[in-house]
Amino acid sequence: MTATSRSAPTARGDRRPRRPVVLLVPVPGTSVIHELWAATKLLVVVGVAVLLTFYPGWVSIGLLGSLVVAALWLAHIPRGALPTVPRWLWAMMAVGFVTAAVAGGDPVVSVGGAHLGLGGSLHFLRVTALTILLIALGALVSWTTNVAEIGPAIATLGRPLKLVRIPIDEWAATLALALRAFPMLIEEFQVLYAARRLRPKDALHSRKERRKQQGREVIDLLATAMVVTLRRADEMGDAITARGGAGQLSASPARPKLADWVTLGLFAAAGATSVTVETLWHINPI
C-alpha cells in the first residue's frame, strides 16, 4: 500500500520536460560540418531548395535526405537539440493524411473488394517528407554555424552583384545585425512575458472586463518591447562604432577549403543523379 502510494507521484514526476526550438545557437563542440565555410552551407541550402522545387520526387528526397542525415551524424548533433513535437501537430498530420486519402488516385489497392486510391496520401507524405528535409537542413546550418559568419559569407557570394551597383556589403551587414539581435530580443521578450505573468491580476467578473484587460496587457507588452528594442539598438550601435563601423560585419578572410569543395562535389553528384533518375522515370515509367 505504501509502495503503491509512493510510486504514483514518482511516475507523474518522471514526465520529461518539453524541449523548445533553439535556433541561431551553434551546438558546442567541433566537427567537419562545424568547420565548413558558411558560404558552402548557404550554397547547399539554396541548391537543395531549387532542386526540390523542380524535381520534388522520392529519389531526390531520398538522396538529399541521406546526405542531411549523414551530415547530422558527422556534426555530432545530440538528441537534446531536437525540439519536442507537440501532440497537436501529430493530430494535424493525421487529419491531413486522411483528408488527402479522400482524393484517391493511382496506385489503387483492393482491400476486401473495395478499391482504395493511395495517390493523395502518397502526395501528402511526399510533401511532408520534403518539408521535414528542408527544416532539418536549416536546423543543421543553424546548429553548426556561428551567426557572425553569415554576413561575411553573403558579402563574398554577392560580390559579383557590385558590378550592377547593388549594395551587397550593406545588405550583408544588415542581415548580420538582424541575426545577432534576434536571439537577444527573443530572450528579452521571454523575460518581459515572465515578469508580466508574475504581476498580480485583478479579479474580473465579466468577459468584457477580461477582454479589456487582455488588450491592455498586449499594448503594455508591445510598448515595453519597443523600448527594450530601441535601447538594445542604441547599445549595439555604440558597440559597432567603437569596433570600427558596420563594414567590419561583412569582412572576413574565410575562404573555401578542401572539405568545402568535397561537400559541393557530393551535393552536385547527388543532385545530378536525382535529376537523371527523375527524368528517366518520367520518360519511361515502370
Image: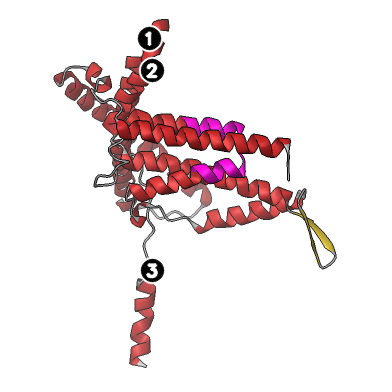
- Residue furthest to the right in view is 113
Query: Visible in this render: residue 228?
Result: no
Seen at 69% across and 55% down, the residue is: 98
Residue placed under numbered mark 2 in the picture = 158
| Quarter of the figure with the N terminus | bottom left
**Which badge, 3 or 2, comes first in the chain's sequence?**
3
Colour mode of the rendering: secondary structure
Residue interval drawn in magenta: 47-64
Q: Main secondary structure of the magenta part?
A: helix
Give the percent coordinates (x, y) of residue 145: 31, 37
Residue placed under numbered mark 1 in the picture = 162
Is label 2 in a helix, a strand or a loop?
A: loop
- Report the front residue among 202 and 16: 16
Crowd band around label 1 with a 10 angstrom C-alpha radius: few (<14), some (14–19), many (20+)? few
Of the residues tagged 3 and 2, which is closer to the observer?
2
- Residue furthest to the left in view is 242
Amino acid type at image mark 1 = Lys
Please check the rendered image and state whether residue 230 is part of the magenta-colored stretch, yes or no.
Answer: no
Give the percent coordinates (x, y) of residue 147: 29, 33
152 to the left or right of 47: left
